[in-house]
Image (tube, rainbow, N blue to C red):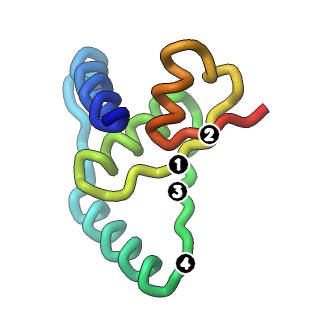
């Protein structure tokens, strides 16, 4: 439920901020195939956004959610563990670091 709610909120945010978000559909399918191969081999996969802004990991998670890929766990700074946002991020798979 928290991931769906965050997906809804982020969808509204992206529409307010950007005229369009372009997704490389071939890249999504390659990622899907790579994730399946990794799962069969028992290998973990790490996605490493550049983290130039909070948009990087939020958009990556939104695209994964929208294309029915596993939503990644996000390492978040302890500064984001604030009322309302902290629990929402935590329920959506984030964990907080000092």
Mark nearer the N terminus (1 vs 3): 3
Q: Which residue is mark 3?
A: 47
Find out whether the residues at labels 2 and 1 contact each other: C-beta distance under 8 Å.
Answer: yes
Q: CA distance from mark 1 to mark 3?
A: 9 Å
Q: Which residue is mark 4?
A: 43
Question: SS of the residue at dot 3?
Answer: loop
Q: How far apart are labels 4 and 1 at the CA level? A: 16 Å
What's the distance in space between the residues labelled 3 and 2, CA to CA? 15 Å
Q: Residue at x 29, y 23 (%)?
A: 9
- Disc 4 to disc 2, C-alpha distance: 21 Å
Within the image, what quadrant is residue 43 found in?
bottom right
Q: Earlier in the sequence, mark 4 or mark 2?
A: 4
Is 40 above or below relative to 97?
Answer: below
Q: Which mark is residue 95?
A: 2
- Asked if disc 4 and disc 1 are in contact, CB closer than 8 Å, the reply is no
Which dot marks residue 29?
Answer: none
Q: Position of residue 63 (x, y in %)?
A: 31, 45
Query: What residue does disc 1 label?
Result: 73
Mark 3 vs mark 2: give the one in front: 2
Q: 94 or 53: which is nearer to us? A: 94
State the residue in front, 10 or 14. Answer: 10
Residue found at x 40% / y 71%: 35
Helix, strand or loop for disc 1: loop
In the image, residue 65 lies at what x, y percent? 30, 47
Structural crowding at the residue carrying mark 3, measured as other residues with C-alpha within 10 Å and reported as few (<14), some (14–19) or many (≥20): few
């Amino acid at each position: 439920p928290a991931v769906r709610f965050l997906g809804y909120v982020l969808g509204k945010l992206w529409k307010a901020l950007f005229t369009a978000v372009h997704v490389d559909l071939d890249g999504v399918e390659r990622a899907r195939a790579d994730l399946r191969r990794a799962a069969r081999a028992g290998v973990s996969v790490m996605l490493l956004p550049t983290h130039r802004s909070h948009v990087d990991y939020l958009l990556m998670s939104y695209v994964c959610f929208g294309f029915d890929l596993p939503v990644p766990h996000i390492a978040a700074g302890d500064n984001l563990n604030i009322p309302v946002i902290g629990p929402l991020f935590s329920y959506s798979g984030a964990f907080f670091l000092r």
